[in-house]
Image: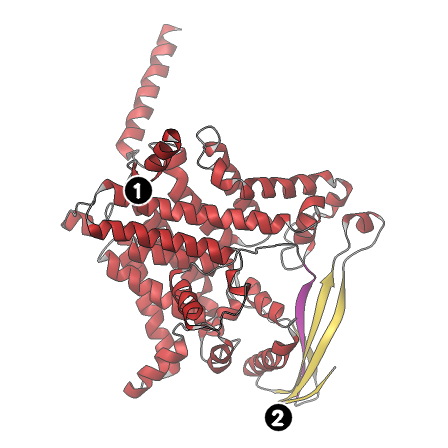
Amino acid sequence: MPLKHKIYFALAAIHLVMIALYSTHFADWGNMDNPASKTLATVGRYTGSNNIFSFFAPGLSDQPYVVYNVKFKDSSERYIDLTGKSPDFTNRINNIYGYLTIPEARAVLSASLAQNIKERYPGAAKIRVAMVVQQIPDMTAYRAGKRSHWKFWFQRDFSVDSTANSQQ
Amino acid sequence: MKKTFSHINNLFFKPEAPETLAYFRIAVSAFALIQLFVLLPDWMWLFGPKGLLPWEISDALNTSNTPSLLFVSNLLAHLHISPDTTVYLLTIIYFLSLIGLLLGFKTRAMAVAAWLIHLMLDTTGHFTAYGVETFLHIALFYCAVLPVGYRLSFDARKKQTLFPSYLITLSVRIIQLHLCIMYLACGIEKSMGGQWWNGEAVWIALQQDQFHKVDTGWMAQVPILPKLLCWGTLLVETFYPVGIFYKKTKKIWLICIMSMHAFIAIFLGLQLFGVLMILLNLTVFGNYCFEGLFLLQWKDVVGKLKLRKAAVAEELVQL
């Protein structure tokens, strides 16, 4: 086997070791703020070897959702469910809503979503972004007659000419 | 010891059908094209400069050092190309590179282009991306570095390059082992949660409004069913590396894992994700589990059918 092919085998081994390491949440092990870890992370990002595979694990949490209330300049009001034209749009926007459960991300993400609504509805004067979460009863509670319900989480109001002016 | 060494030797040096990589390339590029068309009506909302998340926001929140659409747009701004035009240009190049990859025309260059543009789209649309982008990125990376154009391609027709069989085997094994590590990690992580042992995980997933495609309220009256589905998922995922390579279980394991993804696609509405995972499993393990599957030629199938027809006709005559 020529040297070049031996190098291929070595690279393949390194690649697989990286996949195995990152799948064990290697990035959370400790201080990753050093050049070696950063280089590894970048290589991993390009090669797809830096992923964790926590799909639906260790369990499923309450599902967040966002509803928009738009007050128009003519004083009319409308509740909006942000939908797309492609069938996969819902899966993707729900991903953003998932990030809204992180308090630090809330301000900037809700402002972006409000901006998006403004683009879609140019006549809007005030936009309310309200997040709710769906709470699902376990099977025992369901058998006892309990049903899933939506619980209010937070809301932010945006005036079209200014940034966020109130929140709860 | 000798036996173990022989097994490892077999794993990396036993010749694999080069068609495996060709089918992998065709499946990945065809899937990426379908995904592109599915997302096209919302493309600018997902990746445009004033999309769901404006570029400035997604870039500011991005923690990886990978190029984004904003980065490319800033480079092209010197040529007076607007951000919107940048998206259109990259989308057209992405489309053409996927076509090239599908046909196996300038395979390596096309795969590199598709992989890099997908990386940029994924960096910009990071907040809207889910599992399907993770695996498409991985698959496109493998298309860029592995000899996926060695068979069933325009490149192979034009110039036949000779690869040692062990490099084909190595290429196939990398993808197979990547899937093994992924399923093992998935299985272990799931098994750490109580929901996957008492059946609540499947129950909750089916009840969530996002995934609620079919009325499954009746399942609460038969709690053993979601419990069995959860246990089945844990079993199939955690023991995937063993089950898919063990001679006696490999066929049933491939069928089980593909059924699991079909279930996800149908009942949880994650069609793109389900289809991609089925394609990856089928192309990478199909020929390994059902030997000769990819070597089957259309004329062989027709020939076999003719023979069968003749045999049936003969039986009828005898009757």
Instruction: Note whether B292 is above or below A106 in the view shown.
Output: above
Quadrant where the N terminus of chain A is found in the figure = top left
Q: Secondary structure at mark 2?
A: loop
Instruction: Note whether A110 is above or below B310 in the view shown.
Output: below
Magenta span contains residue B232 = no
- Percent x, y of residue B182: 49, 50
Q: Which mark is residue B271?
A: none
Quadrant where the C terminus of chain A is found in the figure = bottom right
Residue placed most toward the observer, B38 or B285: B285
Instruction: Note whether A78 is above or below B12 in the view shown.
Output: below
Residue at image mark 1: B169
Residue at image mark 2: A162
How many numbered discs sit on the rendered protein? 2
Find residue B270 and report its image quarter.
Answer: bottom right
Residue placed most toward the observer, B216 or A1: A1
Identify which amino acid the numbered label 1 is placed on.
Thr
Q: CA distance from mark 2 to mark 1?
A: 61 Å
- Percent x, y of residue A69: 68, 79
In the image as oriented, which residue stretches furthest toward the left? Answer: B159
Marked residue chain, label 2: A
Label 2 Cα crowd, 10 Å radius (few <14 / some 14-19 / many 20+): few
What is the basis of the colouring in this image? Answer: secondary structure
At a point 27% along the width and 58% down the height, the residue shown is B100
In the image as oriented, which residue stretches furthest toward the top? Answer: B318
Residue B85 visible in the shown view = no
Magenta span contains residue A70 = yes
Extent of the magenta region: A61-72
Instruction: Note whether A77 is above or below B201 in the view shown.
Output: below
At a point 33% along the width and 25% down the height, the residue shown is B305
In the image as oriented, which residue stretches furthest toward the front? Answer: B1
